[in-house]
Image (cartoon, rainbow, N blue to C red):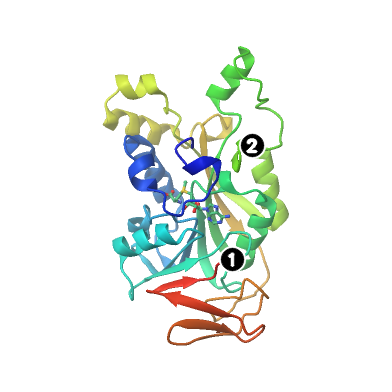
């Protein structure tokens, strides 16, 4: 993530699509393979948290309602240009630590390439668990600190970052790599059970990318994702988790991130919280719940 703006995870105004994704067709393709394998094929309300410019929106074609949440308005503005307003897509400025979404109101939640910017992952998992309905699914990707390349670098003395310790490593401000046991432990503590693991981007090496045609890389990665998952050596790990919880479902869409009230009323250009009286603006079709 050295391409991210000045060592922070602030994506406001950053040309994430143009600066980061050029030359990463392999990563994009293999992430899509993994998501197609993990995502329930259709459903009601799907929430992508840290959705950026909506890169993955086409995968949600068979969901009735898709909510894209991101702290960066400019990313959501770009997503809105791709997926439109007034249809199935809803855009909300918000943060994973205090989601502006109702309790138990979502069927599926996703975070892809987001957790590595999240300082308090256990709190984020609890929040995602809160918004899911009982047995709702959470699909997540995380950057694996004990990937094969890091292990080789450590064992050969080229890196001092211990890949085997369970604690996250912050290799740049607000850029974390995680140990699988840390992520899986956090999910369990939040009330999730892990149903499936996929190893993704195992061939993310400059040499392989130069030597092998794109279609081969993608095909081989797809073949390796499931059989090599238990090794936990890929740089990117995708998990499918299920929210175990008692019946708890809200009819509403939003929750006030300031006071936690779920009684909100939408008016012409704002959402009014009936708990604390705060007014959350709706700007050109984007719900703005920035605290
Ligand atoms: C690397 S981009 C990934 C975007 C998208 N998920 C994708 O895979 O194309 C990371 C995104 O996470 C968002 N983000 C960073 N910190 C966040 C937080 N605390 N809560 C929610 N989203 C966050 C950023 O604004 C950015 O759009």
Seen at 61% across and 84% down, the residue is: 263
Q: Residues within 10 Å of mark 2 (few under 14, many from 20)?
A: some
Residue at image mark 2? 170
Q: Residues within 10 Å of mark 1 (few under 14, many from 20)?
A: many
Image height check: is 179 above or below 10?
Answer: above
Mark nearer the N terminus (2 vs 1): 1
| One can see residue 234 in this view | yes
**Any mark on residue 173, and which?**
none
Query: For this view, does 156 lie left or right of residue 236?
Result: right
**Tag 1 secondary structure:** loop
Image-quadrant location for residue 151 = top right
| One can see residue 65 in this view | no
Seen at 48% across and 82% down, the residue is: 270
Image height check: is 151 above or below 254?
Answer: above
Image-quadrant location for residue 225 = top left
Residue at image mark 1? 99
């Amino acid at each position: 993530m050295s391409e991210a703006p000045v060592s922070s995870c602030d994506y406001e105004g950053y040309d994430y699509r143009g600066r980061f994704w050029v030359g990463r067709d392999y990563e994009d393709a293999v992430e899509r393979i993994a998501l197609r394998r993990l995502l329930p094929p259709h459903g009601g309300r799907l929430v992508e948290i840290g959705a950026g410019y909506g890169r993955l929106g086409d995968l949600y074609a068979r969901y009735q309602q898709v909510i894209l949440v991101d702290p960066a308005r400019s990313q959501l503005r770009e997503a809105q240009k791709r997926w439109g307003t007034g249809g199935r897509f809803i855009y909300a400025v918000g943060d994973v630590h205090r989601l502006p979404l109702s309790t138990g109101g979502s069927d599926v939640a996703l975070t892809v390439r987001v957790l590595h910017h999240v300082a308090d992952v256990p709190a984020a998992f609890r929040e995602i668990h809160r918004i899911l309905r009982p047995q709702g699914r959470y699909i997540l990707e995380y950057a694996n600190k004990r990937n094969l390349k890091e292990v080789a670098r450590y064992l050969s003395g080229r890196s001092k970052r211990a890949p085997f310790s369970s604690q996250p490593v912050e290799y740049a401000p607000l850029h974390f790599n995680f140990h699988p046991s840390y992520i899986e432990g956090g999910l369990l503590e939040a009330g999730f059970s892990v149903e499936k693991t996929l190893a993704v981007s195992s061939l993310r090496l400059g040499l392989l990318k130069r030597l092998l045609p794109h279609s081969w890389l993608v095909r081989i990665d797809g073949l390796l994702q499931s059989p090599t998952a238990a090794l936990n050596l890929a740089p990117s790990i995708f998990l499918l988790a299920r929210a175990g919880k008692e019946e708890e479902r809200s009819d509403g869409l939003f929750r006030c991130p300031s006071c936690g009230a779920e009684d909100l009323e939408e008016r012409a250009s704002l959402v009014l919280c009936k708990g604390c009286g705060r007014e959350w603006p709706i700007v050109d079709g984007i719900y703005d719940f920035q605290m």
